[in-house]
């Protein structure tokens, strides 16, 4: 995969236009920032790209080919909400992911990547917000999808874990991966380009 192109994308919820006429391109190996205040439509844009919301107008292209937004073979979406089962342990959450996504997962390796090894048998509800965020972000390594969609990924991360996430993103870029990040604050990362909503 060489390029993701968004052309004249619009989202409508009920009678309200959330955003319209959004166009940009992101190339393989780049990270793109979508910045905007709360309620500006960042999450709706990411969920539209991920195929959870049908576009009101516009098209999404991969390498010049118009794709069906229900085709989730390109995108790995991590939302601002962690989407974890609070009443299950960290280990059982990961086992559930392996069943849902039909993925073979090395649990110890996955937890080591995000410094969560000591939490393996803890129920998710007992974790700190930062630990929950890191567990949610570990889903990035369930699949080898070429595009990461990260909605407010730095929320609840401390300085060291922010640095670690940036390293993971940079490594993914070096391997040809493409990343789109949303934020309502300035982020210290060498973004290739940015758009303001």
Image (cartoon, rainbow, N blue to C red):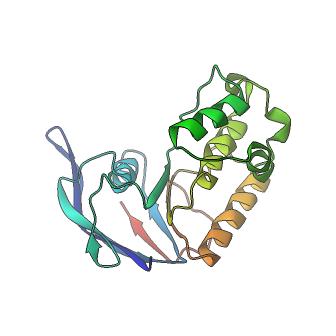
| Figure quadrant of residue 14 | top left
Image location (x, y in percent) of residue 95: 65, 34
Image location (x, y in percent) of residue 52: 34, 45
Residue 131 vs residue 151: left or right? right
Residue 168 vs residue 121: left or right? left
Q: Which residue is drawn at 71% across and 56% down?
A: 162
| Figure quadrant of residue 96 | top right
105 vs 76: above or below: above
Residue 75 vs residue 14: left or right? right
Q: Residue furthest left?
A: 15
Q: Is residue 24 visible?
A: yes
| Figure quadrant of residue 130 | top right
Q: Can residue 180 be seen in this view?
A: no
Image location (x, y in percent) of residue 34: 44, 62
Q: Residue furthest right?
A: 118
Q: Which residue is drawn at 68% across and 35% down?
A: 129
129 vs 112: above or below: above
């Amino acid at each position: 995969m060489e390029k993701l192109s968004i052309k004249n994308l619009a989202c409508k919820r009920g009678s309200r236009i959330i955003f319209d006429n959004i166009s940009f391109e992101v190339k393989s190996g780049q990270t793109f920032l979508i910045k905007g205040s709360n309620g500006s439509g960042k999450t709706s844009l990411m969920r539209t790209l991920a195929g959870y919301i049908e576009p009101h107008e516009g098209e999404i292209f991969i390498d010049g080919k118009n794709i069906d937004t229900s085709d989730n073979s390109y995108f790995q979406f991590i939302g601002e909400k962690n989407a974890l089962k609070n009443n299950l342990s960290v280990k059982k959450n990961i086992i559930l992911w392996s069943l849902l996504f039909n993925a073979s997962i090395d649990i110890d390796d996955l937890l080591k990547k995000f410094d969560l090894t000591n939490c393996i048998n803890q129920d998710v509800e007992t974790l700190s917000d930062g630990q929950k965020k890191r567990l949610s972000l570990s889903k990035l390594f369930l699949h080898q999808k070429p595009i990461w969609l990260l909605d407010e990924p730095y929320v609840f991360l401390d300085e060291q874990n922010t640095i670690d996430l940036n390293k993971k993103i940079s490594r993914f870029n070096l391997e040809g991966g493409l990343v789109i990040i949303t934020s309502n604050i300035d982020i210290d990362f060498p973004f290739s380009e940015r758009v303001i909503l």
